[in-house]
């Protein structure tokens, strides 16, 4: 067997995991979902789910990785003979391959905005029409997407595992500080207070089934759960890394950044467009439409450059982890060389990413399940495949290894303080909740129910 490259230690593991977790999910996806699906009610549901379900899944995946010292497909195969459960390992491995292309398209949007600020177009960036014009032009979109993809693949071809560790160390604190600065500015705009209230104070009138469905999907996405990554990272750790405390640190960091992003964007929506539902329902465009307005009123250029540079770097650490997981699956399962695997990942990224780019312009008429192509990939991975793959992990534990084996693995490195939560979620909640999510999100997409 090839020797596994490992993390340097606890700090290295936490930083790499936080680096992969904190990304566009926190800064771009979380605020637009929170704005759309109930503000404070969404936030509350999100926090409860992260502390219970998210916590359990991260612990379980990391422990499986550390126990087997393998990436998802082989980890599943070494723990069970059951073909159906084994397929779950493949599902875990395939999700990152489908996410990274559309993730890079959004990374391309970030590049476009960064470029705009660098050449001093702060005012143009703040104009709503700029974003729709950009989406409407296939060549600019494709170009930006290719720039981001090239950056990701350069790092992958270079094999800079430690690079990510080091970059994350400097980047994450700077990102947090900058976020605080933008939040302070954003919440002090006239009219912004309504937005702070909408985001922080739960109003149960805004609670719907979709609030729970989208909060759960977002939690998995943001913490990179059920996508092979934590099994892979767990397999790189040594037996003395305390899984429980690292899990809690990663969760806190990821959640703090998401909440700060919410506080940057949502009050700004109220300050600049009022709190009407059209503004709140903007979806994927929200970050690119409202934040530039905030920046412009702050005098613009430099803060825009700083902000989008950091978002770009946070997105890059995530896209590299996604592409890395995809590569290591091909390396491990097909026995391919690293460069051959990386070449295949590049091809997949370019083809699928191009589909997502064209979905906004040339193929705008093609709307599977009423979604543009990018949203369709997002839906397919996060609302359909992810609950199944998460359920596969739970079934693997319940039917094949037993909860005890996972607990023993966790106890090698520390006491297991929240063992009761862990057991309860795995035994009684996980599968049922995942089934509800899967069924309701599919029913919603086909328009069978109105939630
Ligand atoms: N968590 C990342 C973010 O918030 C996105 C992501 C989802 C991811 N799944 C992943 C990153 C798997 C790395 C690996 O942006």
Image (spheres, rainbow, N blue to C red):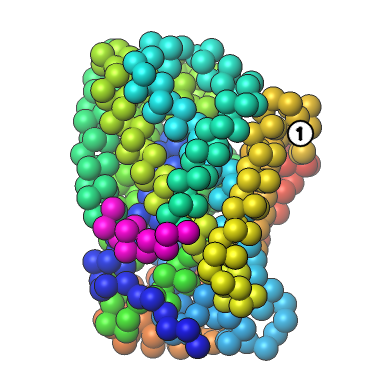
Point out residue 337 in the picture as x, y percentages from the top left corner: 56, 72
Q: Residue at x 45, y 46 (%)?
A: 151
| Residue 146 at x, y percent in the picture | 55, 39
Can residue 268 be seen at all in this image of the molecule?
Answer: no
105 or 433: nearer the viewer? 105
Picture quadrant of residue 284: top right
The quadrant the C terminus occupies is top right
**Which residue is depicted at the point 67% across and 50% down?**
380
Query: In front: 405, or 16?
Result: 16
Determine if residue 370 is in view. yes
Magenta-drawn stretch, dominant element (helix, strand or loop) = helix
**Residue assigned mark 1:** 367
Q: Is mark 1 on a helix, strand or loop?
A: loop
Quadrant of the image occupied by residue 354: top right
**Residue at x-position 48% and y-position 72%:** 231
Name the side, left or right, on which 101 lies relative to 6: right
Residue 55 painted magenta: no
List x then y, in percent, for residue 299.
26, 13
First to last magenta residue range? 157-167
Please say whether residue 164 is one of the residues in the magenta stretch: yes
- Does 230 sit left or right of 302 as displayed? right
Say above or below: 135 vs 107. Answer: above
Give the vertical position of 174 relative to 48 (above or below). above
Q: Is residue 440 above or below residue 9?
A: above
């Amino acid at each position: 067997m090839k020797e596994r490259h490992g993390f340097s230690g606890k700090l290295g593991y936490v930083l790499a995991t936080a680096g992969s977790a904190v990304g566009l999910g926190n800064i771009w996806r979380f605020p637009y979902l929170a704005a759309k699906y109930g503000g404070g009610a969404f936030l509350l549901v999100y926090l409860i789910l992260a502390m219970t379900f998210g916590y359990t899944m991260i612990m379980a995946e990391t422990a499986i990785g550390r126990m087997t010292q393998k990436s998802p497909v082989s980890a599943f195969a070494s723990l069970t003979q059951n073909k159906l459960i084994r397929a779950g390992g493949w599902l875990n491995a395939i999700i990152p391959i489908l996410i990274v292309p559309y993730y890079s398209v959004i990374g391309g949007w970030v590049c476009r905005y960064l470029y705009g600020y660098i050449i001093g177009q702060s005012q143009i960036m703040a104009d709503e029409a700029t974003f729709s014009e950009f989406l409407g032009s296939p060549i600019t979109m494709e170009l930006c997407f290719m720039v981001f993809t090239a950056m990701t693949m350069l790092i992958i071809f270079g094999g800079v595992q430690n690079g990510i560790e080091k970059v994350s160390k400097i980047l994450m604190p700077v990102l947090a500080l900058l976020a605080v600065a933008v939040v302070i500015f954003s919440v002090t705009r006239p009219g912004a207070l309504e937005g702070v209230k909408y985001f922080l104070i739960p109003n149960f009138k805004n609670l719907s089934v979709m609030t729970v469905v989208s909060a759960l999907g977002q939690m998995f996405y943001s913490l990179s759960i059920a996508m092979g990554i934590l099994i892979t990272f767990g397999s790189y750790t040594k037996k003395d890394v305390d899984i429980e405390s690292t899990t809690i640190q990663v969760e806190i960091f990821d959640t703090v950044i998401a909440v700060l992003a919410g506080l940057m964007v949502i009050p700004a929506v109220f300050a600049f467009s009022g709190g009407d539902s059209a503004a709140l329902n903007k979806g994927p465009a929200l970050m690119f439409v409202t934040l530039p307005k905030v920046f412009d009123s702050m005098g613009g250029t430099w803060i825009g450059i700083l902000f989008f540079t950091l978002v770009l770097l946070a997105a890059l650490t995530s896209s590299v982890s996604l592409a890395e997981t995809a590569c290591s699956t091909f390396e491990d399962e097909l026995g391919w060389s690293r460069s051959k695997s990386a070449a295949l990942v590049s091809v997949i990224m370019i083809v699928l990413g191009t589909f997502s780019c064209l979905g906004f312009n040339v193929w705008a008429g093609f709307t599977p399940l009423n979604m543009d192509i990018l949203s369709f990939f997002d839906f397919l991975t996060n609302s359909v495949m992810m609950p199944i793959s998460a359920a596969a992990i739970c079934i693997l534990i319940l039917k094949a290894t037993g909860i005890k084996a996972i607990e023993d693995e966790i106890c090698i490195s520390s006491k297991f303080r929240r063992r009761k939560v862990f057991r309860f979620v795995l035994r009684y909640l996980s599968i049922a909740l995942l089934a509800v999510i899967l069924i309701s999100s599919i029913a919603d997409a086909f328009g069978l129910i109105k939630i």
